[in-house]
C-alpha cells in the first residue's frame, strides 16, 4: 500500500466515522469536531457530501499539485549543501533565482487586485532591463 493509498483510506475512515456519529448516534457537529480534533466547518463540509462526492474530493486532495514542485531540485540541492538553512534564506534564494517564483509569491501573499497589477508591472519592468 502506497502512502497516497494509506492517506485516502484514513480519510475515508474519518468520513465514515463522522457520518456514523452524526446520523446514527445523533451527536452534534461541534461534539464530533472536538472528539475528532477537526474544525467544525470541516465536519459540516463532510456531512454535506455523499460518498461519491467525498471520494472525488479525496482524489483531488491527493493529486493536488504543490506550488514548490518546480523548484524541488533547487531546494534539495541547497539543503544538501547547507543543512541549517532557515526558511527565510531559502525564500530569498528562490526569489533571486526565479522571476516566476517571485511573481507567484507576490500573488499569493498580497491581496487587492490594484496592488497585484502594480507589482506585475514592476516585476515585468525589472525583467525587461
Image: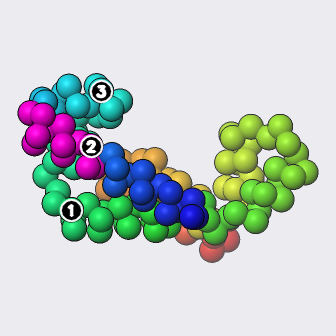
Magenta stretch bounds:
15-26
SS under mark 3 = helix
For this view, does 4 lie left or right of residue 88?
left
- Distance Cα–Cα, label 3 vs label 2: 11 Å
Determine the CA span between mark 1 and mark 2: 12 Å
N-term mark: 3 or 2? 2
Task: Quickly name the residue at label 1.
Answer: 51
Give the mark nearest the N terminus, 1 or 3. 3
Quarter of the figure with residue 99: bottom right
Q: Where is residue 3 in the image (x, y as percent from the top left)?
A: 57, 59
Check disc 2: other Cα within 10 Å, few if <14, some if 14-19, many if 20+: some
Read off the residue under disc 2. Answer: 17
Label 2: state its secondary structure.
helix
Q: Is residue 119 left or right of residue 32?
A: right
Quadrant where the image shows the C terminus: bottom right
Q: Which residue is drawn at 18% across and 46% down?
A: 19
Against 116, residue 52 (above or below) is below
Q: Distance between the residues labelled 1 and 3?
A: 22 Å
Residue 23 magenta-drawn?
yes
Do residues under tags 1 and 2 come within 8 Å of each other at their CB atoms? no
Whether residue 58 is in magenta: the answer is: no
Secondary structure state at the residue bearing disc 1: helix
Q: Name the residue under label 3.
A: 35
Q: Can residue 92 be seen in this view?
A: yes
Amino acid at each position: 500500500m502506497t502512502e497516497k493509498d494509506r492517506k485516502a483510506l484514513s480519510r475515508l475512515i474519518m468520513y465514515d466515522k463522522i457520518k456514523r456519529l452524526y446520523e446514527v448516534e445523533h451527536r452534534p457537529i461541534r461534539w464530533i469536531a472536538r472528539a475528532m480534533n477537526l474544525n467544525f466547518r470541516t465536519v459540516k463540509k463532510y456531512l454535506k457530501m455523499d460518498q461519491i462526492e467525498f471520494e472525488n474530493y479525496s482524489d483531488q486532495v491527493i493529486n493536488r499539485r504543490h506550488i514548490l514542485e518546480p523548484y524541488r531540485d533547487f531546494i534539495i540541492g541547497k539543503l544538501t549543501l547547507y543543512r541549517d538553512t532557515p526558511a527565510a534564506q531559502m525564500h530569498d534564494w528562490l526569489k533571486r533565482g526565479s522571476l516566476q517564483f517571485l511573481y507567484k509569491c507576490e500573488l499569493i501573499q498580497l491581496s487587492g487586485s490594484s496592488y497585484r497589477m502594480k507589482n506585475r508591472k514592476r516585476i515585468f519592468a525589472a525583467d525587461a532591463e
